[in-house]
Amino acid sequence: MKQIIALLTALYTALAGASAGDLGAAFDIIRKGKRIGFHAVNVEDTADGGTRVETRIEMQVKFGPVPVFRYQHVSTETWRDGRLQTVESRTDNNGKEEALNVRREGDSLIIDGTRYRGPGPGDAVPSSYWNKAIVSTRTLLDTQNGRLIDVTVEDLGQTPSPTGAPAEQHRLTGTVDLNLWYQGEHWVGADFVARGQALTYRLIDIGRQAQLFDRLNMTAGR
């Protein structure tokens, strides 16, 4: 186990200086010790000097052989000079369809979502977790439905991430209770409560990441 943790730590450290195109990652979503889905993020530099981020999330919970909960989420973000420009997302939340469209106008974001329509602060950070700017913000933009979430962020220093490797832990509280782990600029883990259930995001090894990205027709970010 110590050797595995050391290897993971070395891997994360080696990745710490990577460019935007190297910030993609994929995670198993764990509930009660069992895998119920995945969260995959692809981050790539664009020809015009911006950044494009694609996120895919899929979850399914079964009672015996019968599915009792399904979730699918697809979103695309564009960034330029460290500022969010647009967000488009579609979500099937156990049969409830939700959508979000966001565009920048000057120093504000214009939000059109199923939970909120109107202006938002230009420095709001999407709840897609890949961008470490999330631990410096006071406002999260829910990429599922557009609601704005006020948060307080606590830096907990180096702690074991969900894989066991040490990383910087940050706790976001408010109407959310979310722990995020980063190694350098790279997102490497998360845990939080959703619908009363504790969920953990465990980083997938590089080989499985490549297979998942290939199946989703996403370019592996690492």
Image (tube, rainbow, N blue to C red):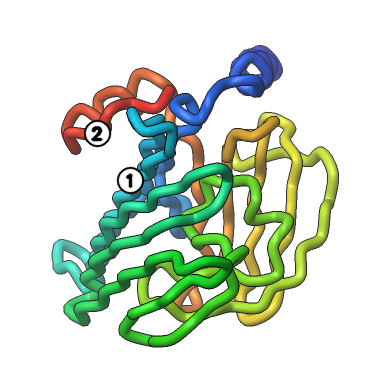
* Residue 200 place in picture, x, y as percent: 52, 53
In the displayed structure, 77 sits above or below 184; it is: below
Crowd around label 2: few <14 · some 14–19 · many ≥20 (10 Å) = some
**Are the residues at dot 2 and dot 1 in contact (C-beta closer than 8 Å)?**
yes
Residue drawn where x is 73% and y is 56% of the image:
136
Tell me, for residue 54, which label it has, or none: 1
Front residue of 62/98: it is 98
Q: Which residue is mark 2?
A: 218
Q: Residue at x 63, y 71 (%)?
A: 139
Q: Residue at x 50, y 48 (%)?
A: 201
Residue 188 placed where, x, y %? 58, 37
Q: Looking at numbered disc 1 in the image, what kind of residue is underneath it?
A: Glu
Q: Residue at x 32, y 52 (%)?
A: 76
**Mark 2 or 1 closer to N-term?**
1
Give the quadrant of the C terminus: top left
SS class, disc 2: loop
> What distance separates the C-alpha of mark 2 from that of mark 1?
8 Å
201 horizontally vs 4: left or right: left
Q: Which corner quadrant holds the N terminus?
A: top right
Q: Secondary structure at mark 1?
A: strand
Q: Does residue 113 appear left or right of residue 196 in this picture? A: left
Residue 33 in view here: yes
